[in-house]
Amino acid sequence: MAKQHLGFGNVLIAITQDSKADPTARQAAALAFKNWIKNSWAPEEGEEGQIATADRDGLKAKLVSVLISLANSPSLLIQYSEAISIIATSDFPEQWPDLIDQLVQNFNQNDWNANNALLSTAHAIFKSLILLCVGGAPSSGQTLCLRKSNMSWTASANPTGHSTLTNLAPNLPRSDQQTLAKSLLLMIQIYYDLNCQDIPEYFEDHLTEFMNLLHKYLTWDIPYLVSEQQAEADDEEEGEAGDLEKIRAGICEVVELYSLRYLDVFPMMDVFVKTCWDMLTKLGRHQRSDILLIDATVFSS
């Protein structure tokens, strides 16, 4: 079969990346690549692998770059992001030790669409590793993630990034604001991923710095990022959670985690509780607020 032949994956990638190709063909190639990886990358025990070693090594060397090239094509991007997560579940860290390095090294403060592609993939990888070791000691993959992703989170959340988010975002076009909001939400989700099993030493050492930032974003307000239906929503059935609601809910999940597991090193608990109570009193009775209402109430009560 063609999918067993050397270079089959590269053919699918080439079609996906060809901006002159028919959009339907590009989407079909992306989906075929993801399914090929899903069905062929990790053979059942005792079965011969369908993907040659040379292809495996070549794909792992280029897939992060492919991801970045598709940053402005979400429907294509998601297929390759899922493919990377599938490979990572099988090969990381033993057979793909530089995966996190590749993600970190490609982070670019001037291209937040590309950053979101990297961050969303990292979040998917971290979540899968967490699920594999729930109730037990961190796996070697998670330990490596914790060690290397300290730099990843710091790179994505450095002062330059925060300046862009809080100072420039209100003056940017709406689409750019939403891109930056997605970046922030992903960073918060990754923060939770990296702390949910145990608090890494790096995060404990910088706890005040990180919690001050999270508290800042808990009270952050940009009208464009609120649910689009907020102005029209006048009953409990209307409206969906906007970016700001999702960001605040994500922060509340982090605070809840710390209140349950790391309260002894979390001196800002009272500050977050007061802020959340103040925020809860201002929420409308609309569906869009449910996600925030639930997460904020859990640790505030």
Image (cartoon, rainbow, N blue to C red):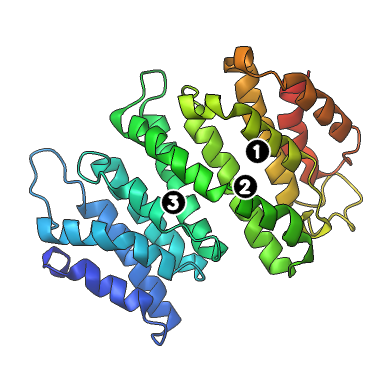
- Please tell me which of labels 2 and 1 falls first in the chain: 2
Q: Are marks 3 and 1 in contact (CB under 8 Å)?
A: no
Q: Residue at x 69, y 54 (%)?
A: 163
Label 3 packing within 10 angstroms: few (<14), some (14-19), many (20+)? many
- Badges 2 and 1: C-beta atoms under 8 Å apart? yes
Measuring from the top left, give residue 172's x and y in whole percent: 74, 67
Q: Which mark is residue 250?
A: 1
Residue at horizontal 53 percent and vertical 57 percent from the top:
116
Q: Quadrant of residue 13?
A: bottom left
Between the C-alphas of marks 3 and 2, the distance is: 13 Å
Q: Quadrant of the N terminus?
A: bottom left
- Left or right: residue 249 versus residue 25 is right
Q: Which residue is mark 3?
A: 121
Kindly identify the amino acid type of the residue bearing the numbered disc 1. Gly
Q: Say which element carries label 2.
A: helix
- Residue 81 seen in render: yes
**Which element carries disc 1, helix, strand or loop?**
helix
The three-letter code of the residue at mark 3 reads: Thr
Quarter location, residue 58? bottom left
Asked if residue 52 can be seen in this view, the reply is no
Asked if residue 30 lies left or right of residue 163, the reply is left
**Which of these two is toward me, 299 or 221?**
221
For the C terminus, the image quarter is top right
